[in-house]
Amino acid sequence: IFGMTELSERFSAGLVRPWYSVQLCSEQAELRLLGGATVRTFYGLADLATADTVVIPSVRDVSQPCSPELVHAIRAADERGARLV
């Protein structure tokens, strides 16, 4: 992330508005990652409703189903034409 921030500042000088605004959206405000790091976010699933691109990461346990709320938010983003990655 640091490298991207530094590059963005160097190459985006003079742009009227940034090309991207990245928001980490989650069902929980705090996520513990494999390896022990903790990530906090203020953005929930409702924020996916305005996303142009939704990046869907891997899951911790493939044997556990995703919540119906998450599935609904991703399907709604797809139906309105958001890019799913």
Image: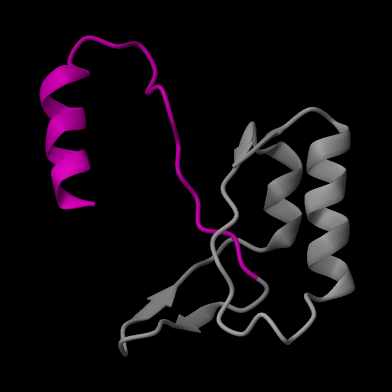
Tell me the residue at 16%/19% (across/down).
Answer: 11
> What are the residue bounds of the magenta stretch?
1-26
The x, y position of residue 62, in whole percent, is 66, 80
Q: Left or right: 37 with respect to 61?
A: left
Q: Is the magenta stretch mostly helix, strand or loop?
A: loop
Q: Left or right: 79 with respect to 62?
A: right
The x, y position of residue 42, in whole percent, is 54, 66
Tell me the residue at 66%/63% (across/down).
Answer: 44
Q: Is residue 22 located in the magenta-colored stretch of the structure?
A: yes
Tell me the residue at 44%/74% (across/down).
Answer: 40
Q: In front here: 23 or 85?
A: 85
Q: Left or right: 26 with respect to 41?
A: right
Which quadrant of the figure has residue 66?
bottom right
Q: In front here: 78 or 29?
A: 78
User: Farthest residue in the bottom direction?
Assistant: 36
Quadrant holding the C terminus: top right
Q: Left or right: 85 with respect to 33?
A: right
Note whether 81 is above or below 27 in the view shown. above
The x, y position of residue 60, in whole percent, is 55, 81
